Amino acid sequence: MSGDLTVNLGERSYAISFGENLSDAIRHAVERFTANGRRVAVLTDTNFATLQAGALAAMFGPTPVLTVAAGEGTKSLEGLGQVLDFLAQQKLDRGGVLFAVGGGVMGDLGGFAAATWLRGIEFYQVPTTLLAMVDSSVGGKTGINIRAGKNLVGAFHQPRGVYISTQLLTTLPPREFAAGMAEVIKYGLLGDAELLAQLERDPLRPESPKIAETVRRCCATKARFVEADERETAPEGGRALLNLGHTFGHAIENVAGYGEYLHGEAVAIGLTAAARLSQKLGYIDSSDVTRVEAVVAVHALPTRLRAPLAFADLHAAMTRDKKVRAGGLRFVVLKQLGEAITQDGVALDLVEASFRDVGAH
Ligand SMILES: NC(=O)c1ccc[n+]([C@@H]2O[C@H](COP(=O)([O-])OP(=O)(O)OC[C@H]3O[C@@H](n4cnc5c(N)ncnc54)[C@H](O)[C@@H]3O)[C@@H](O)[C@H]2O)c1
């Protein structure tokens, strides 16, 4: 795996650094900040702090660390309050720096706290789940959930840098690894046919030597889409293509109850539903759908709902989804495997039939 990647966003550009173990680089960065009189704080969750206590110490030494409860529930107003209170206690001024260490929950929460504390301070992402490494740590979307829905409150706030140490994945539970693979497969389907073929030939496992290279490849794809359409305002295509499978997936998460499916598991079912929809729209054929299902299944992910959900509920959830609300019945579909497009005006009966194909009733 060679060198850093740059996310080119003018004055908001930043580097994504890759390595087996970037503890030294992170510690040196922290030391430079403190030597310059800047206060540094770290946010992480209980699982990471317990399972990777050594790595945390190697990265941050005596830097103050706030450890919050693990899980989606912390991406909340209460969780945000905890982080902001901590930043206040630690007296971070506008030159302060926050490191968000953990999965997507820590990145989204920490990033949003950094966006709002004193109207915005610098923050760094240290992703520790596969999902966060390939997806949530890059691109600057930060936010929390409120009762009305997931990710409804947030800000675009780009990190100043991302440090990806793939060695941190060694303690990740297999189910979480698989959930991250849903996003990896997503990149293959939406814009990297070669990656897709590689995953079909040689499924990616936690111990695979290809992990580092694959993570970098996914970040490069994400960076390309973010650079072209940072705030997802392109009238078609653009950053929205990164949501392949997510309109279906978000509805599944919402109706099943958060926690029933991991985000990546819901996205996996969403990818197969999106493939079905793409077939119904005449873009791909049944052998392509079979390929999508096979690559999802071989990575220990569900292709169908574990228990049926009512389409009426899924539809209601979709209409509450901010992405759908903004654009009517717009879906990301596959023009071919390796190329996604946005499709407006999708007929509701095709959406319903696609949901039924993956087990809705
Ligand atoms: N901002 C974005 O662009 C973006 C993109 C995709 C997803 N997300 C968000 O990301 C979140 C999901 O992220 P996630 O799947 O990383 O969830 P997560 O942060 O909850 O992490 C999953 C689990 O793994 C544990 N964990 C983290 N690192 C570990 C390690 N190295 N070893 C052992 N356990 C570890 C965590 O404690 C947690 O229990 C969702 O809230 C989703 O909305 C954001």
Image (cartoon, rainbow, N blue to C red):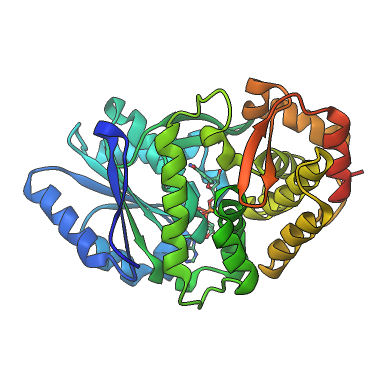
Residue 180 visible in image: no
Horizontal side of 195 relative to 39 (left or right) equals right
Position of residue 312 measured from the top left corner of the image (x, y, whole percent): 87, 32
Comparing 206 with 223, the one in front is: 223
Residue placed at 56% from the left, 42% from the top? 242
Q: Residue 25, located in which quarter of the rendered image?
A: bottom left
Q: Residue at x 55, y 61 (%)?
A: 195
At 43% across and 34% down in the image, what residue appears?
A: 228
Residue 164, image quadrant: bottom left
Report which quarter residue 279 is drawn in. top right
Nearer to us in this view, 17 or 148: 17
Q: Residue at image x 22%, y 55%? A: 63
Q: Considering only vertical position in the picture, is 95 above or below 234?
A: below
Q: Decide if residue 261 is on the left or right side of residue 227.
A: right
Which of these two is toward me, 193 or 177?
193
Q: Position of residue 194 (x, y in %)?
A: 55, 61
